Amino acid sequence: MMKKICILVVAVCMVLSACSNKTNNVKFSEFNSEYVPVNEITDTYSEALKLEYAHFTIRDSVRISDVSSVSRTLYKPSDGFLFNKEQRFIDYLNGSPVDLSKISVSSDDMGEYHQLNAEGGYPYFTDYDGGSIVWIKDEDAEAFFLTNENITVKRYYCCNTFDDEKYKLKDCEMSISEAIEKSAEFSEGLRKIGYPQMSPFEIRVEKINDTYAFRIDMVQQDNGVPLRAANSGFEGRESSVNDVFTGRLSKINSNPAGYTVLITSSSDIGCFRNNENVFCEYEKENIDKVITPYSALRYIDDNLSDNSSYEVDYIGLENKIYWVDSETGVYSSTPMWTVSLYSPTEEKLYYALVDCETGDFSFYSQSSGDINL
């Protein structure tokens, strides 16, 4: 009898150990959700924001962006926007025409290195594998973008409300709303030369010594629904062993989307990063009904571990781009309720996803350094 008990205890411990190794942040509960027509989804927002949940609180600043339609969409990467191919693109970023014949090209650990003048110095750009490109205007932009000295002191989603504080940049004081407006103007200039329409999505206030800069993530949007990487808030990355992906995200090849701009002064954009892919719509299938945000939040709440205590600083419906057909180059995306969960005790950021059609649940940690304060 004792031997049987010992065997049973060992077996239970092995099962618990396996579960613990997968993740100690989530569990799985039965899904039972409410669906509404897409044109009625905005009417459900207030209920989702005002109700109480067991494992998280929603910050007062959180707002959910309106959407007018929802779809499953296939995309192809836009062609012809690499620096060494687009004269107009280079001229726009430089603020004046560039003589391509005078650009010197070399390589370093970062990739192909393009110097815009024979004397060296700034500006320059780096081309990662022919896709992800960083444009550096001056040494101040380089200090903020390419070193580990900068500290993120504030982080905001543009859809939320926030105190419009001013920060001391290199040559001026600039408010958060002014920085967002500046990034939108920059995006409009790119649109006029053929770049897809982009919108400010997330802004971070960064600091080196006593000087600040604004780092703003720009995204493509389809009727209010942003296109974002599947296993990250913005930049693509390798999944952790403790991350949980189900349903359409069971096997993902996540790809970053959109671009980042860095504002260090009152003059032009100091740094531009194209996050590997900007996409053109290839095929679309509209969705008539989606899960309500309250149902998604309740399901996330039910799936969090019993001792969880998070702060929600973002709720939104996002088209998660998650897969590429290597033969055709077509990327798939699907709309998901996306919730940013900050753990004050861990000082760590997590994302929870609920497929707005199937209810499939995914949960993962953000990369280190993306700490929300």
Image (spheres, grey):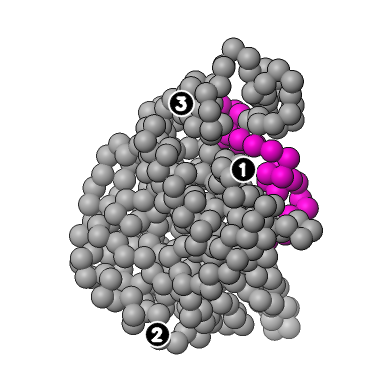
Q: Give, as a three-letter code, the residue at label 1.
A: Gly
Measured as percent of width and height from the top left, residue 266 is found at 59, 50
Q: Secondary structure at mark 1?
A: loop
Is residue 141 in view from this perspective?
yes
Q: Secondary structure at mark 3?
A: helix
Q: Quadrant of residue 281?
A: top left
For disc 1, the neighbor class at 10 Å (few under 14, some 14 to 19, many from 20) is many
Inter-mark Cα distance, 3 to 1: 18 Å
Measured as percent of width and height from the top left, residue 169 is found at 67, 56
Measured as percent of width and height from the top left, residue 89 is found at 48, 29
Residue behind mark 3: 88
Kindly identify which numbered label has been placed on residue 299: none
Q: Nearer the viewer, residue 295 or 40?
A: 40
Please indicate whether residue 28 sits to the left or right of residue 49 in the image: right
**Of the two numbered discs 2 and 3 in the rendering, the one whose residue sits closer to the viewer:** 3
Q: Residue at x 42, y 27 (%)?
A: 79
Q: Nearer the viewer, residue 168 or 342?
A: 168
Q: Give, as a three-letter code, the residue at label 3.
A: Arg
**Of the two numbered discs 2 and 1 in the rendering, the one whose residue sits closer to the viewer:** 1
Q: Is residue 128 magenta?
A: yes
Q: Is residue 92 above or below residue 371?
A: above
Inter-mark Cα distance, 2 to 3: 48 Å
Quadrant location, the N terminus:
bottom right
What segment carries the magenta color?
A: 127-152
Q: Is residue 314 above or below residue 222?
A: below
Q: Give, as a three-letter code, the residue at label 2.
A: Lys
